[in-house]
Image (cartoon, grey):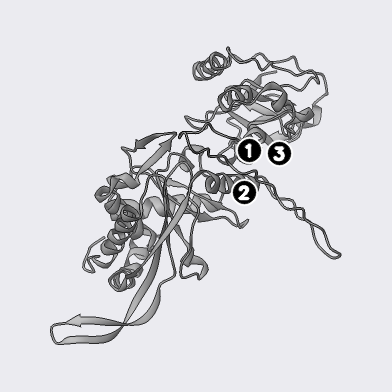
């Protein structure tokens, strides 16, 4: 018999492991070429692993909720076996030679925790992975404190998600930076909730839990300020109405307002590059690349943020194609981890839900996020050579939430106004 290992694939530069969510094939099942065998989840995105061969699944090397490193075998497929003739003879343990990249990652983690006093396992036999111990060491968590964290992994194992959730709620008291003042973070305690008769308890799915933790962390890390401006987008609306039918017939896809908004964001960032930064302690990291994330709604109601990499290098056609591709694959859960990471600025369209404006939460580690509202017709005063007149115009509110640690009101306000200026100055005769 020819037995072939199904390997956990490389899923991005920053992804070293994944969790088995669900097996789609059981032992003895026939597997076709490119047919999905199991569902996995990283800290960035959920996806499926397809088979590169035809055969029969003879061994599942991991159980659901197990964490698998990139480069490890997750299953064994027999290319000669018949599904009706599969026996339950144990398959010898497969020794997988780790990839060069995986070896480097593990070496870095091990070197990082060499000086820590946190052991691999506690007195209660709770196992701590190198990654968890590395995070604990960096954040100053002692072994006894780590022991107190409730783990959601197998046999109570503390996962990366558990320790990050703990850190977002952990009370810390940093040293005073001034002789006469001491700054401390308040203890964050969730209120006690009573369940009343007829109430329904719905457990959050995995993605909703991640979003919840990320939003709480963002508000805890960044002092949020939001500014607003109203833009006249009549030229944009008229241009899109003029070209959308021909574009659909020619390209086979729709043209939306999103690529126009992204283009205006890129131009405004070039004018005010200190919006395109991140904060690392007391250091400001000024980003070279302009990677614009666009929030997209999933059928489940959750949001995901695919990223348009190097958006400043694309023309309107390129932005349109990229926006449509990412949005379509987001809805079908076919995004790759690298396609939802690396963003330097985020754009969200609250107008898609009929809202005129919103106060979005910053997508860490970025320092600003733009929200555009619904486009509505309004009477407006227009200045002409013959004097002021009242006309019907298409108006839209835009809001910018920004991190007040590094973005002052003047910078945030000027950036937002410049974004609106680019929208109002849109060329209604542009070809695409």
Mark drawn on residue 212 = 2
Q: Can residue 179 be seen in this view?
A: yes
Q: Are the residues flagged by discs 2 and 1 in contact, CB closer than 8 Å?
A: no
- The residue lying furthest to the front in this view is 180
| 63, 383: nearer the viewer | 383
Pointer 1 residue: 171
Q: Is mark 1 on a helix, strand or loop?
A: loop
Q: In which quarter of the image is the C terminus?
A: bottom left
Is residue 121 found left or right of 280 in the rendered image?
right
Label 3 CA crowd tier, 10 Å (few <14, some 14–19, many 20+): some
Q: Are the residues flagged by discs 2 and 3 in contact, CB closer than 8 Å?
A: no
Q: Quadrant of residue 391?
A: bottom left
| 181, 62: nearer the viewer | 181
Q: What element carries label 3?
A: strand
Label 1 CA crowd tier, 10 Å (few <14, some 14–19, many 20+): some
Mark drawn on residue 22 = 3
Q: Is mark 2 on a helix, strand or loop?
A: helix
- Whether 130 is drawn above or below 380: the answer is above
On the image, the x and y values in percent for residue 134 come to 59, 22
- Whether 257 is drawn above or below 219: the answer is below
Sequence-wise, which precedes: disc 2 or disc 1? Answer: 1
- Whether 238 is drawn above or below 150: the answer is below
On the image, the x and y values in percent for residue 346 come to 42, 50
Sequence-wise, which precedes: disc 2 or disc 3? Answer: 3
Q: Is residue 61 visible?
A: no
On the image, the x and y values in percent for residue 264 come to 30, 57
Q: Can you tell which of label 2 and label 1 is closer to the viewer?
A: 1
| 260, 85: nearer the viewer | 260
Mark drawn on residue 69 = none
Mark 2 vs mark 3, CA separation in Å: 23 Å
Q: Are the residues flagged by discs 1 and 3 in contact, CB closer than 8 Å?
A: no
């Amino acid at each position: 018999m020819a037995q072939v290992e199904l390997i956990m694939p490389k899923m991005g530069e920053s992804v070293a492991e994944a969790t088995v969510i669900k097996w789609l094939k059981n032992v003895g099942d026939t597997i076709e070429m490119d047919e999905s065998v199991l569902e996995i989840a990283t800290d960035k995105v959920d996806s499926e692993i397809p088979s590169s061969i035809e055969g029969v699944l003879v061994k599942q090397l991991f159980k659901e909720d197990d964490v698998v490193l990139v480069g490890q075998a997750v299953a064994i497929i027999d290319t000669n076996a018949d599904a009706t003739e599969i026996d339950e003879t144990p398959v010898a343990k497969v020794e997988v030679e780790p990839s060069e990249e995986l070896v480097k990652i593990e070496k870095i983690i091990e070197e990082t925790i060499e000086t820590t006093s946190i052991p691999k396992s506690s007195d209660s036999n709770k196992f701590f992975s190198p990654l968890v111990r590395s995070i604990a060491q960096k954040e100053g968590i002692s072994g006894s404190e780590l022991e107190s964290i409730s783990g959601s992994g197998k046999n109570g194992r503390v996962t990366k998600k558990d320790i990050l959730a703990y850190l977002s709620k952990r009370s810390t008291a940093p040293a005073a930076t001034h002789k006469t003042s001491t700054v401390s973070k308040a203890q964050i305690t969730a209120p006690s909730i009573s369940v009343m008769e007829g109430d329904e308890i719905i457990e959050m799915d995995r993605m909703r839990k991640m979003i919840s933790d990320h939003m709480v962390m963002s508000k805890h890390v960044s002092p949020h300020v939001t500014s607003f401006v109203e833009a006249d987008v009549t030229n944009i609306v008229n241009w899109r109405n003029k070209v959308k039918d021909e574009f659909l017939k020619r390209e086979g896809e729709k043209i939306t307002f999103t690529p126009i908004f992204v283009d205006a964001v890129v131009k405004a960032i070039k004018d005010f590059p200190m919006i395109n930064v991140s904060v690392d302690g007391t250091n400001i990291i000024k980003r070279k690349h302009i990677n614009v994330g666009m929030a997209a709604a999933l059928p489940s109601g959750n949001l995901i943020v695919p990223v348009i990499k190097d958006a400043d290098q694309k023309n309107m056609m390129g932005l349109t194609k990229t926006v449509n591709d990412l949005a379509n694959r987001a809805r079908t859960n076919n995004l790759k981890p690298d396609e939802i990471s690396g963003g330097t600025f985020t754009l969200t369209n609250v107008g898609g839900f009929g809202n005129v404006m919103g106060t979005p939460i910053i997508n860490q580690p970025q320092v600003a996020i733009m929200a555009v509202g619904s486009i509505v017709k309004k009477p407006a005063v227009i200045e002409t050579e013959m004097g002021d007149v009242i006309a019907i115009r298409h108006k839209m509110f835009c809001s910018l939430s920004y991190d007040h640690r590094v973005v002052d009101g003047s910078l945030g306000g000027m950036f937002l106004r410049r974004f609106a200026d680019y929208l109002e100055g849109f060329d209604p005769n542009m070809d695409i």
